[in-house]
Image (tube, rainbow, N blue to C red):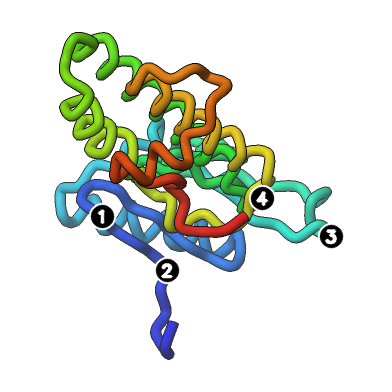
C-alpha cells in the first residue's frame, strides 16, 4: 500500500497476518513464534484460524497445513474479527445477518425493560440503541434480499416501539419522530 508492505494488522490483542501465498503465511507464522518467544508473548492457536481467499479457478486446489506452536490451525470460510463477520467469498451477508440478530435482541431488551416509558423516552432509546449499526460502512457485497431483511427488522422494531400495527408504513412517522427512515448508508 503506497509502496509499503503490509503483511500484518494489529489491534489491541488481535492480530491478522496477510500473505499472497501459503509459503509466505507459513513464514509469517514462524516469525510470530520467534517474536513471541523473545518478547514473552503467547499466541493462542486454539483461537486462531486461517481464511483463504481464492479465485474460482483455485477453488479445487488442496490446502496445506498451517501450524502455530505445533498446533494445526483450522481453515474457515467465515470468521468473526473485531465484531464483524468476514467471509472467504467476500460476501457481507453473514455480517448483515449478525446485525439483524443484534437489532432484534437490542430492540426486544429495551422494549421489555422500558415498556411503560413515554413515547419520547422510547424514541430516544430507539435512536441510541437501534439506529447506530456497527460496521455498516464496510458492506459492499451482499444479496439484496439479505439487506431487505435487515431493513424489515429495523422497521418492525420501530413499529413495536411506537405501538404501530405491523402492516402500517413507518416512513412518515420516522420523519416526524426524527428517526432515520433507513439505517443504511448505501442505496440498494
Write down the residue under mark 1.
11
Q: Position of residue 54 (x, y in %)?
A: 70, 57
Compute the Cα span from label 2 to label 4: 20 Å
On the picture, is 95 further left or further right than 88? Answer: left
* Image mark for residue 7: 2
| Discs 1/2, front | 1
Q: Which residue is drawn at 43% across and 20% down?
A: 164
Foreground: 123 or 32?
123
In contact (CB < 8 Å): disc 1 and disc 3: no
Mark nearer the N terminus (4 vs 3): 3
Q: Mark 3 points at which residue?
A: 57
Which x, y percent locates residue 136?
A: 43, 50
| Quadrant hosting residue 173 | top left
| Mark found first going from the N terminus, 2 or 4 | 2
Instruction: Give neighbour class at mark 1: few <14, some 14-19, many 20+ (Cα, 10 Å).
Output: few
Label 4 sits on residue: 89
Amino acid at each position: 500500500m503506497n509502496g509499503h508492505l503490509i503483511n500484518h494488522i494489529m489491534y489491541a490483542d488481535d492480530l491478522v497476518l496477510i500473505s499472497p501465498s501459503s509459503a509466505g503465511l507459513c513464514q509469517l507464522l514462524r516469525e510470530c513464534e520467534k517474536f513471541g518467544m523473545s518478547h514473552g508473548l503467547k499466541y493462542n492457536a486454539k483461537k486462531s484460524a486461517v481464511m483463504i481467499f481464492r479465485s474460482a479457478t483455485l477453488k479445487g486446489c488442496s490446502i496445506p497445513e498451517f501450524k502455530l506452536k505445533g498446533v494445526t490451525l483450522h481453515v474457515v470460510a467465515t470468521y468473526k474479527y473485531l465484531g464483524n463477520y468476514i467471509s472467504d467469498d467476500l460476501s457481507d451477508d453473514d455480517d448483515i445477518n449478525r446485525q439483524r440478530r443484534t437489532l432484534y435482541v437490542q430492540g426486544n431488551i429495551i422494549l421489555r425493560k422500558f415498556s411503560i416509558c413515554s413515547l419520547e423516552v422510547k424514541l430516544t432509546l430507539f435512536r441510541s440503541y437501534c439506529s447506530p449499526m456497527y460496521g455498516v460502512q464496510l458492506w459492499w457485497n451482499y444479496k439484496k434480499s439479505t439487506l431487505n431483511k435487515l431493513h424489515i427488522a429495523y422497521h418492525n422494531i420501530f413499529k413495536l416501539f411506537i405501538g404501530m400495527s405491523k402492516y402500517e408504513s413507518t416512513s412518515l412517522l420516522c420523519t416526524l419522530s426524527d428517526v432515520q427512515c433507513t439505517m443504511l448508508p448505501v442505496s440498494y
